Image (spheres, helix red, strand yellow):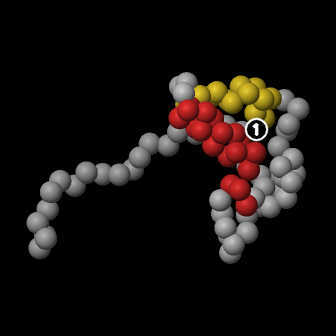
Amino acid sequence: MEEKAAALHTVESAVQALGRGFDVTFDSRLLYCKGLAESRIVEVDEEHTRDFVAFDDLVVANVSRDIRRVQVKSRREASGIRSFHE
């Protein structure tokens, strides 16, 4: 249960950080996003919201419809075992 609460907090922080700026010369952690929590550089429709399904059992309430989750397949290819000299 504690893991789920931590995961929910992380996803909520990530959603709040979307559209805000980072000073990558300083730090790119979500804690150091530029601006107030409600201010964004990119416009996001906050009036039309829905429940956002981050994972099968993790749902965040009142997330803008503008924010979507796209699942990308891994492009990693297995090459088998090779010797050092190959």
The quadrant of the image that shows the C terminus is bottom left
The foreground one among 49 and 1 is: 1
Identify the secondary structure beneath mark 1: loop
Residue located at (55% from left, 32% from top): 2
Residue located at (78% from left, 35% from top): 64
Q: Is residue 13 above or below residue 1?
A: below
In this figure, what is the number of numbered marks?
A: 1
Horizontal and vertical percent position of residue 45: 85, 38
Q: Is residue 58 left or right of residue 32?
A: left
Residue located at (69% from left, 30% from top): 60
Task: Using the rendered image of the protein, determine whether residue 79 is visible from the camera's viewpoint.
Answer: yes
Q: Is residue 41 above or below residue 66?
A: below
The foreground one among 36 and 66 is: 36
> What amino acid is at disc 1?
Asp
The quadrant of the image that shows the N terminus is top right
Dot 1: within a 10 Å radius of its alpha carbon, few (fewer than 14), some, or many (20 or more) residues? few
Q: Quadrant of residue 59?
A: top right
Q: Is residue 69 left or right of residue 82?
A: right
Q: Quadrant of residue 52?
A: top right
Task: Using the rendered image of the protein, determine whether residue 65 is visible from the camera's viewpoint.
Answer: no
Horizontal and vertical percent position of residue 50: 75, 26
The foreground one among 2 and 33 is: 2
Horizontal and vertical percent position of residue 10: 63, 43
The residue labelled by disc 1 is 66
